[in-house]
Image: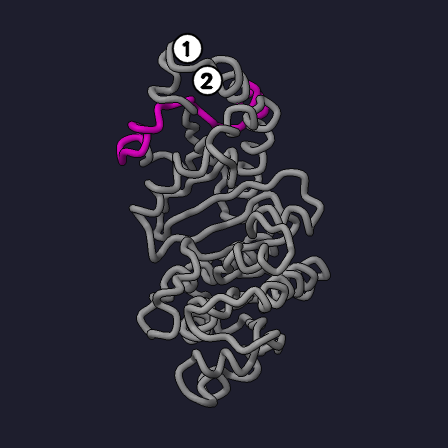
């Protein structure tokens, strides 16, 4: 993805995530690349300034590296000092506060997009705040009844995988699938691929739920009773959504070459394939929101925090995608 010199000025917020994880140091590394790629964009980093300076590698590294007109550090103080790899529930509300500030800024029009570094769900829950994940929290905070989690690779024809259900126990997936829900999910994917990714006629391949896509009902009836009727209704609305296909054979180049996205029925049906193909360069996008949000395809990597060995490739790709999506939205 290349930056265009005449790109309109955009404002991108970046939350630094769990302070004990790799988020702060990856943010510093990714910004060096992003500032060069997108000279007309302005980046606001939300986090503890001293923590960012420390994880950037040397005192003054942030202010010395980034033009003041392009990168702003919006200081949010840690509740307690943080050490790499050592979680502390006292900082759980700090992490959530960064996300709240980014969401509020985007809803108010201050930010054109937000990019989130990884957080640790357990830290927030241990701080006494029920928290399932970024995706669910963004939906709640923006009063969005349905959002779609999509992970994607990079390149001219990236692999994209969206999910009909997200962070659910496997035993709850079947009951969570409805005709209306799948249709709404496909409508969101179709709309956002057009509006934010510049795809004029998205083709969305849809998996079944059961092995062999139910094998004509012998291995389950969800394909017959729910998924197929949903696809028929979606196609009547002008959405190109063939399926349901067996998930164990769908992820082959000969099937994916003409596809813009795959809709999988549950988290671990589609994401292992995506992460195997793109890990370290993939991104997470929340579709259906009134704001643009992208993120990395990995977690807090506590074992790598503070070592200098963490790869910023996924965060760089998330920033690139956020800028590109914001440009498409503004142009539309």
- Which portion, as a residue range, is magenta? 233-255
So how many labels did they put on this image?
2
Residue appearing at x 61%, y 66% in the figure: 98
Foreground residue among 120 and 113? 120
Q: How is the image coloured?
A: one colour
Q: Is residue 211 visible?
A: yes
Where does the N terminus fall, quadrant-wise? bottom left
Q: Where is residue 307? Give x, y as percent.
A: 33, 74
* Residue in the image at 57% along x and 78% along y: 73
Residue under label 1, please give it.
Answer: 217
Residue 35's tag is: none
In the rendered image, residue 210 lying in the magenta stretch gets the answer no
Q: Confirm or deny contact between disc 1 and disc 2 (CB under 8 A).
A: yes
Q: Secondary structure at mark 2?
A: helix
Which residue: 45% across, 69% down? Answer: 86
Question: Mark 1 or 2 closer to N-term?
Answer: 1
In this rendering, the answer to whether 210 lies above or below 120 is: above
Q: Residues within 10 Å of mark 1 (few under 14, many from 20)?
A: some
Q: Quadrant of residue 100?
A: bottom right
Indicate the secondary structure of the residue bearing disc 1. Answer: loop
Residue holding disc 2: 223
Q: Residue at x 38, y 74 (%)?
A: 306
Residue 147 horizontal/vertical position (percent): 59, 41
What is the crowding at mark 2: few (fewer than 14 residues within 10 Å), some, or many (at least 20)?
many
Mark 1–mark 2 Cα distance, whole angstroms, equals 8 Å
Judged left or right of residue 197, residue 130 is right
Question: Whole-percent x and y of residue 165?
Answer: 52, 35
Viewer can see residue 331: no
- Residue 238: within the magenta? yes
- Of 150 and 301, the residue lying toward us: 301
Give the answer, above or below, for where 135 lies relative to 42. Answer: above
What is the x, y in percent for residue 203? 44, 33
């Amino acid at each position: 993805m290349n930056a265009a010199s005449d790109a309109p000025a955009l404002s991108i917020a970046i939350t630094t995530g769990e302070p004990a994880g790799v988020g702060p140091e990856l943010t510093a590394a990714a910004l060096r690349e992003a500032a060069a790629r997108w000279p007309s964009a302005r980046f606001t980093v939300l986090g503890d300034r001293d923590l960012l300076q420390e994880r950037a590698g040397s005192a003054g590294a942030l202010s010395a590296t980034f033009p003041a007109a392009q990168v702003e550090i919006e200081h949010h103080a840690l509740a307690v000092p943080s050490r790499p790899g050592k979680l502390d529930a006292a900082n759980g509300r700090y992490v959530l506060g960064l996300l709240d500030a980014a969401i509020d800024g985007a809803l108010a029009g201050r930010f054109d997009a937000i990019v989130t570094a990884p957080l640790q769900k357990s830290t927030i829950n241990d701080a006494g705040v029920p928290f399932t994940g970024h995706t669910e929290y963004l939906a709640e905070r923006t009063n969005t009844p349905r959002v779609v989690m999509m992970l994607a690779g990079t390149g001219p024809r990236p692999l994209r995988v969206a999910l009909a259900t997200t962070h659910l126990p496997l035993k709850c997936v079947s009951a969570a699938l409805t005709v209306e829900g799948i249709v709404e999910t496909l409508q969101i994917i179709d709309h956002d691929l057009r509006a934010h990714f510049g795809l004029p006629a998205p083709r969305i391949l849809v998996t079944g739920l059961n092995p062999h896509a139910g094998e004509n009902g012998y291995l389950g009836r969800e394909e017959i009773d729910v998924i197929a009727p949903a696809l028929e209704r979606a196609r009547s609305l002008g959405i190109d959504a063939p399926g349901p296909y067996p998930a164990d054979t769908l992820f082959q180049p000969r099937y994916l070459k003409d596809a813009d996205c795959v809709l999988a029925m549950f988290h671990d049906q589609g994401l292992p394939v995506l992460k195997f193909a793109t890990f370290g360069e993939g991104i997470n996008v929340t579709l259906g929101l009134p704001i643009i949000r992208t993120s990395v395809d990995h977690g807090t990597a506590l074992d790598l925090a503070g070592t200098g060995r963490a790869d910023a490739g996924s965060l760089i790709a998330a920033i690139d995608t956020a800028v590109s999506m914001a440009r498409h939205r503004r142009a539309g």
